[in-house]
Amino acid sequence: MYKVALNFSDGRTHFIGVNAGETVLNAALRQGMTLPVDCREGVCATCKGTCQSGSYELDYVDEDALSEAELEKGAVLTCQMRVSSDSALQFDFDSTLCTSAGPEQIDATVKAVEIVSESTAVVHIDASVRAGQLDFLPGQYAHVQVPGTDEWRSYSFACAPNDRNQLKFLIRLLPQGVMSDYLRDRVKPGDTLRLKAPLGAFYLHQITRPLILVAGGTGLAAFLGMLDEMSAHPARYTQPVTLFYGVTQAADLCEIERIQGYAEKLPNFSYHNIVMQENGGWQGPVGVVTDLFEEHHFNGGEIDAYLCGPPPMVDAVKNWLDQREMSNSHVHYEKFSAS
Ligand SMILES: Cc1cc2nc3c(=O)[nH]c(=O)nc-3n(C[C@H](O)[C@H](O)[C@H](O)COP(=O)(O)OP(=O)(O)OC[C@H]3O[C@@H](n4cnc5c(N)ncnc54)[C@H](O)[C@@H]3O)c2cc1C
Ligand code: FES
């Protein structure tokens, strides 16, 4: 049996015993530590941490979950990690996330599906069947069962928690996809939508310095949740917040009025949009999100950055930040890997 220290961002450390051949995740769950978990297959990176000491092997790591550079720096997936010595792991989230009861299942109802761009729908959900507020941290996500199938997909809450449990998801409609096809062809108000939530370790931490939020496509969802929360309590959020939002083409941009609304409520909030392909009379910048970055956005490296969206976008932004050696910056990210 190996002794493994789990260090959390709130400064707490929990020790677990891990049997030879057992994954760190299974050992933690066995001992009552509900580490964040989703796919259990090395694909989603929900269970990621960093190994600070000790020797280990990882069974399978999808290239979208962790990059080579992250692996070299000791990034690990606890669902795939088998230790061969006493070890210490660092996690980017508070220990309180691991001592709650874990996700719960709710049979919510589809209220409406609003098409907000050529490729995006906002799905409005009524989860008031649950007595009491469904608590989640802005940025976290739910597992959603595609009605009429056994398939589950992950979606970030595109809203803050509220006592009426009226929830929203911002969902990209792929040309073909199990959830995309349901939302395009079969959905109707009143459908039951089974959710498991809350999930994930990507959430808004305490803000003590300027925030950089970088969204690729529907990665915007997580930031809508965070910005809903901030704009409901503007006096608590006085640090500069800059949102960079990149999409493939102008027709994919969505929720711009909502973003503009945050700018009216939060005095230190600004946003910049960019599209990759120029067409349809778009007058703004063309390129990838990192093309929008300027020195002054980064406060000499004293920033907290949150990145959310397709894995290539998240990796590109992380590389951009790494190359500038912003060693004091703190980067949190969520990759929208395919199921
Ligand atoms: C933690 C997490 C949070 C997520 N949050 C959101 C969210 O808030 N909004 C959102 O729109 N999506 C989100 N996703 C992605 C989402 O879970 C699904 O993967 C996506 O909606 C596709 O589902 P589908 O059933 O329509 O397509 P599928 O049936 O899963 O896929 C159909 C085909 O499309 C490919 N594909 C799947 N996803 C993508 C993609 N993103 N880009 C290109 N090709 C793809 C698949 O490989 C497959 O070939 C999240 C993913 C994760 C892991
Ligand atoms: S739970 Fe470990 S990679 Fe998904």
Image (cartoon, helix red, strand yellow):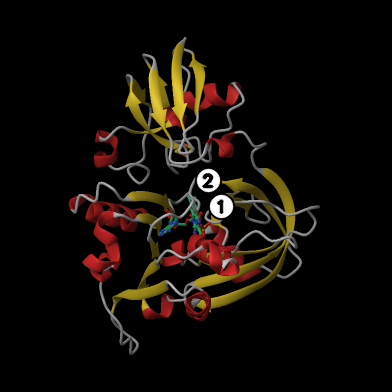
Secondary structure beneath label 1: strand
Which residue in the protein does label 2 denote?
200
Q: Is mark 1 within 8 Å of ligand 1?
A: yes
Closer to the camera in the image, 143 or 332: 332
Mark 1 / mark 2, whichever is N-terminal? 1
Residue 2 picture location, percent across and down: 44, 12
Q: Amino acid at mark 2?
A: Gly
Work out how far the residue at label 1 is from the one at label 2, CA to CA, in angstroms: 6 Å
Residue 141: which numbered mark, if any?
1
Looking at this view, name the residue that lies furthest to the top.
1
Closer to the camera in the image, 210 or 245: 210
Visible residue check, residue 257: yes
Secondary structure beneath label 2: loop
Visible residue check, residue 150: no
Circles 1 and 2, Cβ within 8 Å, touching? The answer is: yes
Q: Is mark 2 within 8 Å of ligand 1?
A: yes
Residue 129 picture location, percent across and down: 80, 56
Q: Amino acid at mark 1?
A: Tyr
In the picture, residue 298 is in which quadrant?
A: bottom left
Residue 111 picture location, percent across and down: 72, 69
Residue 46 picture location, percent across and down: 47, 42
* Residue drawn 44% across the image and 51% down it: 338
* Residue drawn 75% across the image and 63% down it: 164
Mark 2 Cα within 10 Å, few/some/many (few <14, many 20+)?
many
Mark 1 Cα within 10 Å, few/some/many (few <14, many 20+)?
many
